[in-house]
Amino acid sequence: MKKVLIITYYWPPSGGSGVQRWLKFVKYFRDFGIEPIVLTVNPAYATFPNHDYSLLEEIPDGIEIHYTKAKSPFELYKKVRKKEVPQSGFSGEKKTGLIDKMMRFIRGNFFIPDARIGWNEFAYNKAVEIIKKEQINTVITTSPPHSTQLIGLKLKAQFKLNWIVDLRDPWTEIYYNQELFRTTFAKQKDYKLEQTCLKNADKIIVVSEDIKRHFSANRSEIAAKIHVIPNGFDETDFLKIQNRKLKIENKIISYVGNLGEQYPIEEFLEAFADLVKTHPNWKLQFVGNCYAGVKHLTERLGISESVEFVSYVNHSEAIHYMINASVLLLIIPKIENNKGILTGKLFEYLATGNPILNIGPKDGDAAAILRDHATSITVNPNEKASILEFILNSTSKTSTFTPISENKFSRKSLTGEVARLIIE
């Protein structure tokens, strides 16, 4: 077995799609001759927006995991604001007061590339110890937080090892940077760090073609070492859920995942309000963290009785809600460079075989995948007639999900692609 060191801030008991991406790779690496060693932050010192303790059960037996301390300015935020850490760099909170704006300014200009850089010193020292002891010659760093990539950069310089960079999101162009009141100096410093990491990495993995285009724009030397390996679904997550479909009298449209203010939901809710006037058996369900404005909109439109809000649930429960939906709702946030957004949720939606209504760019990467692999439609938020027609007609075309390891989006198949990059 070839030993590989994986450095990731997000690891169970943290929840979210970023955690699942590398948890699933670790789960299947041994099938491809890779023995993963994981370096992560001690949960007692970490700042996780969500927790999912059920994911701890998916860590394979015998995997070597190292935990370190970290320093975090978010502890001050929680004390001052008396609330939990904001989602995705404050991206879910647009309407803020003076203190929040000050916090954003400090976050954007004094913690570059991000506020979790306080983990780097501890992680680097531990990584050096592991590399020397285990004779590691391949290190993988995955981000966000993009400060994690600086650990890999330093290790690359010291040991001249094979460094693979996994970028799940854009770096300097990530959408919430616009909310952080960054100065020109901060922007330039962050860009320099990004470009230095891209230049020095031996291989780069991204989750979509659009993200690859942005990182490699006008730079053929960078493009040559970027590999697109998307998120996916783990068939075992679906096989272990008994009684796939419940007998539900109402038809349900389900949105599963975080929903912030950048998501164009208002016009869809207006379309849904029209739907229930003539088809009252339809219900709408939001599962996960949802900003307060959505509930206010449902009240204003008079559809509160037809809408259910379910707070954050563990991964297994989330899949349960996906499977039992009549139609799955996917919304791409209305932000710059959103064409390359491919969340893990999209592929788990695919795995259910249920119809998928996608509100987002018609020329985006998500739309292209849905066209080829699902009963689906991609629409602009204001295409009310198309939305209603799809909802009313698509349920009769629901396909049956038959999980197979050969599926190009299965986590095991995708792990094989990562393993080939490590071994070649």
Image (tube, rainbow, N blue to C red):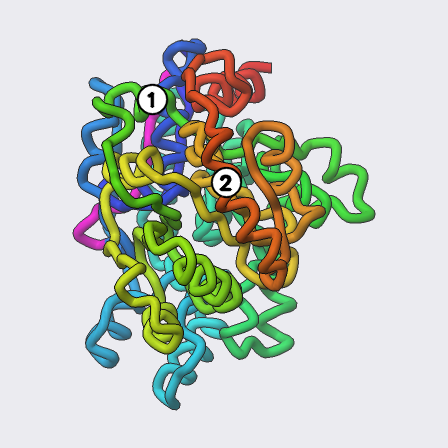
- The residue lying furthest to the bottom in this view is 98
Q: Give the quadrant of residue 323.
A: top left
Residue at (42% x, 58% y) in the render: 278
- The residue lying furthest to the front in this view is 278
Could you tell me which quadrant the C terminus lies in?
top right
Q: Are marks 1 and 2 in contact (CB under 8 Å)?
A: no
Q: From this view, report whether residue 350 is shown above or below residue 334.
A: above
Highlighted magenta segment, given as a residue range: 35-45
Q: Earlier in the sequence, mark 1 or mark 2?
A: 1
Q: In the drawing, does residue 255 fall left or right of residue 208?
A: left
Mark 1 or 2: in front is 2
Residue 66, image x, y percentages:
25, 35
Residue at (24% x, 27% y) in the render: 58
Q: From this view, report whether residue 399 is shown above or below residue 395.
A: above
- In the rendered structure, which amino acid carries the disc numbered 2? Ile
* Residue 19 located within the stretch drawn in magenta: no
Could you tell me which quadrant the N terminus lies in?
top left
Residue 319, image x, y percentages:
31, 35
How far, Cα to Cα, is label 1 from label 2?
A: 28 Å
- Per the image, the residue denoted by label 1 is 27
Q: Label 1: state its secondary structure.
A: helix
Count of numbered marks: 2
Q: From this view, report whether residue 169 is shown above or below residue 95.
A: above
